[in-house]
Amino acid sequence: MELKGLDYNTQRERLVMPEYGREIQKMVEVAVGLPTKEERMRCAKTIIRQMENKNPQVRESADYMQTLWDHLYLMSHKQLDIDWPYDVSEAEKITNRPQAMSHPKKDGQAHLRHYGRLLEKMFEQLKTMDAGAERDELVRITANQMKRDLMAWGHGSMDDEKVADDLARFTDGKIQLDLSNFRFERVDLAGLPKDAGKKGKRKK
């Protein structure tokens, strides 16, 4: 979606692997531009450690290191010239997703991922509101609720940039959150479901 006159997340280059965030994508771009293979390899190993910390649920897979190196290969747009410790020749299979199934709709609107019906209504209301204190307050409430929902149902991910990006997308670009000035409320982990941030934990 092209939004004229706006310059924020919706107009930035789409991330190859959004789960790692834009900072790690920038690190990958730096690694690609390093002059020697030795420097690129050292940088790549550092990035892999950061990727593992950023997306810890990947460790649930037995071959998670293969997955991380595959992701790094894709994030570099296959331009990172190093001696790959894993075979990344089939990395692109990760992006070959099956055709999406039709989503059941209610009242003409599909549920918006993990945000639910309440936030869906708030997004719709924000689209029609004029700029001012009332809209600013609803933006504050909406953004903080989105962050809480991400923490509760997004496997521990509550990246501020993802909140800003989703808020812009679901309001058709009308709400552009300025992360340099906006301050999120502290998320009370004690008030979240006990399994918040955990993915598919097996029963013993």
Image (cartoon, grey):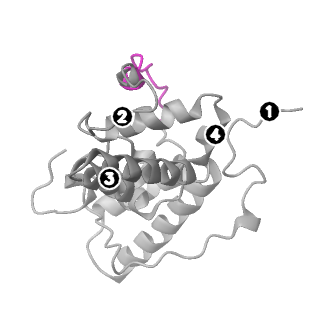
Please count the marks in the image. Answer: 4
How packed mark 2 is, by other alpha carbons closer than 10 Å (few <14, some 14-19, many 20 or more), is: few
Residue that appears at 45% across and 48% down: 45
- Judge by depth and name the residue closer to the eye, 197 or 75: 75
Front disc: 3 or 1 = 3
In percent of width and height, residue 177 lies at: 33, 69
Disc 4 marks which amino acid? Arg
Q: Are the two marked residues, 4 and 3, in contact with CB atoms closer than 8 angstroms?
A: no
Residue 190 picture quarter: bottom right
Disc 2 marks which amino acid? Asp
Residue that appears at 17% across and 63% down: 7
Residue 127 picture quarter: bottom left
Q: Earlier in the sequence, mark 4 or mark 1?
A: 4
How packed mark 3 is, by other alpha carbons closer than 10 Å (few <14, some 14-19, many 20 or more), is: some
Q: Are the two marked residues, 4 and 1, in contact with CB atoms closer than 8 angstroms?
A: no
Q: Which residue is mark 2?
A: 83
Q: Earlier in the sequence, mark 4 or mark 3?
A: 3
Front disc: 1 or 2 = 2
In percent of width and height, residue 105 lies at: 47, 30
Disc 1 marks which amino acid? Arg
In percent of width and height, residue 102 lies at: 43, 20
Q: Which mark is residue 39?
A: 3
Q: Which residues are magenta?
A: 93-108
Q: Which mark is residue 59?
A: 4
Residue that appears at 45% across and 54% down: 46
State whether the magenta stretch is mostly helix, strand or loop.
loop
Disc 3 marks which amino acid? Glu
Determine the CA span between mark 4 and mark 1. 14 Å
Secondary structure of the residue carrying tag 4 is: helix
How packed mark 4 is, by other alpha carbons closer than 10 Å (few <14, some 14-19, many 20 or more), is: some
